[in-house]
Amino acid sequence: MLRRARQSVYWLEIEGDLQHRRAQCTSCDEHAPSMPPEEMIHTPPAEYPFQQVVAGMFQIEGNVYMVYADRLTGWLEVAHFPCGATSNKISNHLRSYFSRWGVKVRLSSPQYPQSNSRAEAAVKPAKRLLRENTSKGGVLESDNTALAILQYLNTPLMEINKSPSCNGSPAA
């Protein structure tokens, strides 16, 4: 609006007057485009397994899960929150993961998935694995779930042509 007005007319107080007019316009609020996404800050690539990890939350059929994944190898672990995910429950799961590897936390913006692209990339295979392989109520403790995760961990990933288990898993 300001650019268009500057092209058409000139007066000294144009910016202030237009901002005042815009602030009073309810129709402008309803039809204004949303705020542009934040500029993505690129994280340097990991040099060794579990140097950089990510976590992401997702739901399948009302069941809440968290995926925790290594950025380098693609190794992933999944937690189920059968009665909902509270910050305390999430913290407890993360604490157990963090205690295995010395993890330093770096937060990303939750409303901008592109700022946490590796976590989003870990959610996709986790959803595929769990969709048909969890027992009633989304429970992870089943043979089907264990076999699906094991198969994923033993399958070479396209980007690195190595499986997560051969590329520096916790058991390696």
Image (cartoon, rainbow, N blue to C red):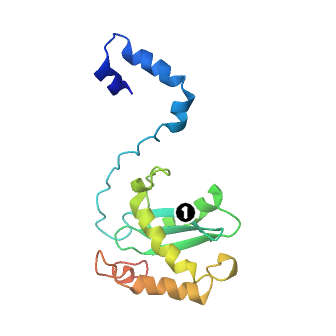
Which quarter of the figure is the C terminus placed in? Answer: bottom left
> Label 1: few (<14), some or many (≥20) within 10 Å?
some
The residue lying at 48 percent from left, 63 percent from top is 55
| Residue 113 coordinates in the image, percent (x, y) | 44, 56
Q: In this view, does 36 lie to the left or right of 141?
A: left
Q: Position of residue 68 (x, y in %)?
A: 49, 68
- Along the horizontal axis of the image, is 162 left or right of 114? left
Q: Nearer the viewer, residue 85 or 11?
A: 11
Percent from the top left, x then y, of residue 160? 28, 76
Residue at screen point 52% across, 88% down? 147
Where does residue 16 sit, x and y in percent of width and height?
42, 16
| Location of mark 1 (residue) | 57
Q: What residue type is labelled 1?
A: Met
For the point 44% across and 15% down, the residue is 17
Is residue 53 toward the left or the right of residue 10 in the image?
right
The answer to whether residue 25 of the structure is visible from this angle is yes
Tell me the element at label 1: strand
* Residue 117 lies in quadrant: bottom left
Q: Quadrant of the N terminus?
A: top left
Residue at the location (54% across, 63% down)? 57
Q: Can residue 102 be seen in this view?
A: no
Q: Is residue 95 above or below residue 127?
A: above
Which residue is at the far front?
A: 8
Q: Is residue 9 left or right of residue 33?
A: left
Q: Residue at the right extreme? A: 83
